[in-house]
Amino acid sequence: MIRFYCEHCAHKISVRDKDIGRQGKCQKCGGVIVVPTESTIIDFLCEYCDREISIPKSQAGKKVVCPKCRNMFVIPAIHAPGSGADQDYSGDMIARTTDSSHGLTLMDAPDEYKLKEEPAGQSNISDQDSKAEEAESATQRNLPWQIDIFLYPISASGMIHLAVFVIVPLLISAFIRFIWYFLGPHLGLATAEITEPVDLILKGIFYSYVCYYVADCVISSASGNRRAEDVSIPNTISIGDFISQAILLIGCTAICLAPVLLYSVFVKRTDLWFWALAAYGTFFLPMSLLRGIMFDAFEALNPIEIVRSICSSLLPYCGLVLFFLVVGGFIGAVIPRLPFWEFLKQTLKVYLVLVLAHRLGWFYWWYKDKLGWGL
């Protein structure tokens, strides 16, 4: 995962490794940006109060004052793999000029993130993600996390995507009926011969984008975001990228749940083996999804690494599994029986899926040091 600041508005951005070199627009200011070849952000803890702080790599080695405890310390130098101890990061955010048609000049480290030189050689830094924190209200920051995570889709982007994910399938179904009504009699084809292929293609593309957005919510939450943001889509992305993301999510789920599903189909009974396979799939599913999304590769599903990651954060991970069980059970068993319109049921399902995505990314945000994935 590549993490860097927008050169125009200092908004923190996280994208997948495969997006290196792609051009896109910042979802906050709309400025044209190019994804760097490596992360340009340092994440470290204050030596005295363990406050987590993020700043550009170019500030490594400078003296700073912690914004929380006000103690002075030196920003640690983070070196790229294989680099020497004297690696210079001063060029991480060098001045560059974008395509003249956009009329934008990429700046050095944004002013609000630069360290101000003090007479005694000290510097001051802002809290981690101070721009984002200032945008949040005190009520949002002070809510217990058990409540705050359920408010993740409550943002302009979250509400728009929620509406799109519920309405578009209805529009596709209406379009299919339109095709059958006007073309079916003229072509002499049965309903299924016309509607099924078109329905499969349109919904396949649409749900591939849904998977892409859900994965983007996990990555955004893994960077510490508390509310849904605009999906980060580079200009050069294709439908194939959406489909590959869908295949990855489906593959992660299938690896965990396929044993119990196959047992249910062929044996057709719920005995001790059925519940054992169901427990296995449910327990390993969250970590498999998290690793698959964060690394964006099937290679991340190495069983040894999955087990190691679970053992490194066993107690909080058990809480994550329990959360998935409760919310997933509510989606699959309770919502279909509610005396609501089907439209409202579908809205609630999508809403809770976004909450699950946020909870998954938020788990990584809190326990990334224990997981030790090096992202």
Image (cartoon, rainbow, N blue to C red):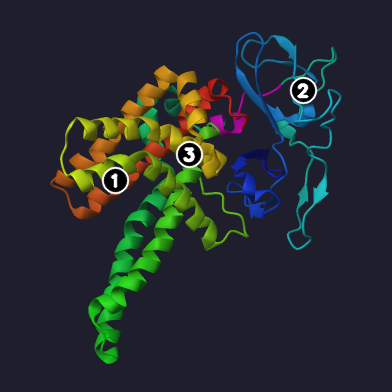
Separation of residues labelled 2 and 3 (CA atoms) = 28 Å
The x and y percentages for residue 313 are 46, 20
| Chain-order first, disc 2 or disc 3 | 2
Q: Give above or below for 191 relative to 107.
A: below
Nearer to the camera, 48 or 212: 212
The residue depicted at 48 percent of the width and 39 percent of the height is 218
Residue placed under numbered mark 3 in the picture: 218
Residue 131 part of the magenta segment: yes
Amino acid at pointer 3: Val
The residue depicted at 55 percent of the width and 29 percent of the height is 133
Numbered disc 2: secondary structure: loop
Residue placed under numbered mark 2 in the picture: 77
Separation of residues labelled 3 and 1 (CA atoms) = 17 Å
Residue 375 part of the magenta segment: no
Horizontal side of residue 156 vs 326, given as left or right: right
Amino acid at pointer 2: Ala
Q: Report crowding for label 2: few under 14, some 14 to 19, many 20 or more residues within 10 A (C-alpha).
A: some
Identify the magenta region. 125-133
The residue depicted at 23 percent of the width and 48 percent of the height is 345
